[in-house]
Amino acid sequence: MSSVYLTHNLPTTVPATPTPQQLERMRPIRLLALDVDGVMTNGQLQFNADGSESKSFNTLDGHGIKLIQASGVQVAIITGRQSTMVTQRAQALNIKWVVQGREDKLQALAELIQECHLSWSQVAYCGDDLPDLPAIRKAGLGISVPNAPEYVRHHADWITHTHGGLGAVREITDTLMQAQGTWTACINHYLYNHRVTPTTPSTAS
């Protein structure tokens, strides 16, 4: 039986301030497409006694996905592997666009863009390996992670400070929201829109 593990590790580094050029690329983004292994996870696969596969997902990443969805940016998953755990995780996060078993990630992303009626400049893609390279290079904002090989990172417009599976996706979502001016409203919602409701003391003896 497959397992999904959730972790709550804090990002290991503080994200650097994006350059003006990176901010310019971030502002029009309306779709964030993510690879899974090495981006949403640390890239490791665990195999159970029955031969099924297990992956670990980060809860900070998950909440970041929910926040950026609420801000109006759609999220998609494009992965070369087939996994019921990815399906479960996507369902839990209300990710509508889930493409599995596709090594031709550029073509898969192009099909998503057409379905969403977007342009390439409105799309960010994050990946960590050679099958991701065409999509990283074509997207309006190509993103990679520190755990990716140097020859993949070399082609990215932006590299997160945080490793895949340890909060990299959260770094991406937070930074995109800051660039698009939706982050302050998000923070204020949590600071000022939550109140403790007074309860009536119990009269039971």
Image (cartoon, rainbow, N blue to C red):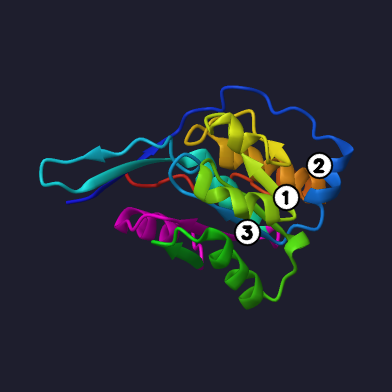
The stretch in magenta equals 71-96
- The amino acid beneath tag 2 is Gln
Say whether marks 1 and 2 touch (CB < 8 Å): yes
Q: Secondary structure at mark 1?
A: strand
Query: Looking at this view, is 27 or 63 the one in front?
Result: 27
Query: Looking at this view, is 122 or 73 the one in front?
Result: 122
Q: Going 63% across and 35% down the picture, which residue do you hit?
A: 153
**Residue at numbered disc 3:** 69
- The amino acid beneath tag 1 is Leu
Residue 22's disc number: 2
Examine the rendered structure and indicate whether residue 167 appears above or below residue 193: above
**Residue at numbered disc 1:** 141
**Real-space CA distance between mark 3 and mark 1, rounded to the nearest whole angstrom:** 17 Å
Q: Looking at the rendering, which quadrant does residue 127 occupy?
A: top right
Q: Secondary structure at mark 3?
A: helix
The 10 Å Cα crowd at callout 1, few under 14, some 14 to 19, many 20 or more, is many
Q: Is residue 87 visible?
A: yes
State left or right for residue 52 relative to residue 133. Answer: left
Q: Is residue 191 visible?
A: no
Q: Going 68% across and 47% down the picture, which residue do you hit?
A: 142
Q: Residue furthest top?
A: 13
Residue 130's disc number: none
Q: Quadrant of the C terminus?
A: top left
Query: Looking at this view, is 106 or 93 the one in front?
Result: 106
**Which circle, 2 or 3, is nearer the viewer?**
2
Q: Looking at the rendering, which quadrant does residue 91 occupy?
A: bottom left
